[in-house]
Amino acid sequence: MSDYQLIIVGGGPTGLAAGLYAARARLKCVLLEKGVPGGQVLTTDWIDNYPGFPEGISGAELIDRMTAQAKRFELEIRSGAVVTGMELAGPVKTLTLEDGTTLTAQAVILATGARPNKLNVPGERELAGKGVSYCATCDGPFFRDQEIAVIGGGNTAIQEAVYLTRFASKVTVIHRRGELRATRIVQEQAFANKKIEFIWNSSVTAIEGAAGVENLRLRDNDGKESTLPVQGIFVLIGIIANNEILPAEQLEMAEGFIQTDREMRTNLPGVLGAGDICYKEVRQVINGAGEGAVAAMSAEHYLAGL
Amino acid sequence: MAGDNVKHLSDKDFEATINGATPTLVDFWAPWCGPCKAIGPMVEELANEYAGKVVVAKMNVDENPTTPGKFGIRAIPTMILFKGGKVVDQVTGAVGKTQLVAMLGKAL
């Protein structure tokens, strides 16, 4: 006998949506979250593209509501449950927790998500929290009337660059290409904002400063070097998979992300993948939640066939 | 009630608290910070579990600008562990409870 029918690993919007569906299906289910429910969406100031909230909603508020909704149907959520190992190949899946205890289940949904990419340049680690940031919402207000840089050209980078103009006197967006990838309405807001300047076709090679960030060393695509004096740098250059706890030798992966089919099934029977940890193009709250729902229903289907 | 053991510090009483005989963990936070809000319940848990051994405190960086500036804090949540007025360790970001428990061990 397994401890649970279903274990969900990860408590972001994807895991919470999966939990909601699993709880309503009356599956014996637990959601394991390494910290507290939320995930990356907590670092988002304002979400304007999740349907049902015409005025938009903060990331934290959305998570509070998703958690409350799942709990209304008695989903068991374990916060601070750090998974350190997984055995997923057989009919009984075994998850090992940090304290050495194990949990077993017949099915598992992997919704471990992703985290912000780092630049991996000198000075980044030393000055983290001292001017180097990965969360505009969290740290923007520390840069009132100061000059800062945003690195990246995607939706997150450009949306947060606009947000940061509320505080900073000047925001320089540094992008390694000659055009932005961000969606059109976000680009329009940035180009219309007088506080935002752009440095195109350039990368950061080093972050310099003693007690805090003072300068960025830049190199353009022709190899020309320059220095940009700033007090803060927001690194918003995409994500990497939270895949350290996944059994790479068992699961089929691509570029560190899990390969799934349309029903969120992996190559292993009874193991589903959902949300940002999946190999795909679009990573939004809405499809994360959608995939969580699909994964839960696929798990239900799998369990019914046992 | 939850949170009763968490001490809310201001710029005024900060020095006196960290200079006290008991090690102090200060969670620098603000209402606009999602991850700060997320780790709130965990900080309360620690306050309850370490009552009498560690003073677990929170400081709102919006209402108290002096102290965060003094410690060069430009990202939150930042947690700093003090013993006898000196910084023992510090960590930035929404870290897990295990990591904070390990950090508290350094002052006990």
Image (cartoon, rainbow, N blue to C red):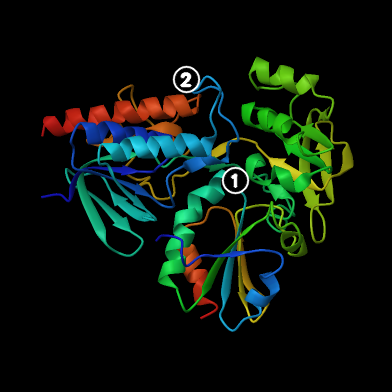
Where is residue B66 drawn, in percent x and y? 76, 61
Where is residue A303 drawn, in percent x and y? 15, 34
Q: Residue furthest bottom?
A: B21
Assign a secondary structure to mark 1. Answer: loop
Task: Tell me the residue that label 1 is attached to.
Answer: B33
The residue marked by circle 1 belongs to what chain?
A: B
The residue nearer to you, when weighing A168 against A183, is A168
The residue under the point 80% across, 35% down is A171
Q: Quadrant of residue A274?
A: top left
User: Label 1 neighbourhood size at 10 Å, few (<14), some (14-19), many (20+)?
Assistant: many
Check residue A51 in the rendering and tell me which mark sits there, or answer none. Answer: 2
Where is residue A118 drawn, in percent x and y? 63, 45
The residue under the point 24% across, 34% down is A22
The residue marked by circle 2 belongs to what chain?
A: A
The residue nearer to you, when weighing A202 against A233, is A233
Q: Is residue A280 visible?
A: yes
Q: Is residue A252 visible?
A: no
Q: Is residue A56 left or right of residue B42?
A: right
Same-chain check, marks 1 and 2: no
Q: Quadrant of residue A153?
A: top right
Q: Is residue A303 left or right of residue A13?
A: left
Q: Is residue A54 left or right of residue A104?
A: right
Amino acid type indicated by mark 1: Cys
User: Label 2 neighbourhood size at 10 Å, few (<14), some (14-19), many (20+)?
Assistant: few
Where is residue B43 drawn, in percent x and y? 48, 61
Please determine whether, in this image, residue B89 is positioned above or below residue A7: below
Q: Is residue A12 left or right of residue A102?
A: right
Amino acid type indicated by mark 2: Pro
Please determine whether, in this image, residue B27 is positioned above or below residue A150: below
The residue under the point 36% across, 54% down is A83
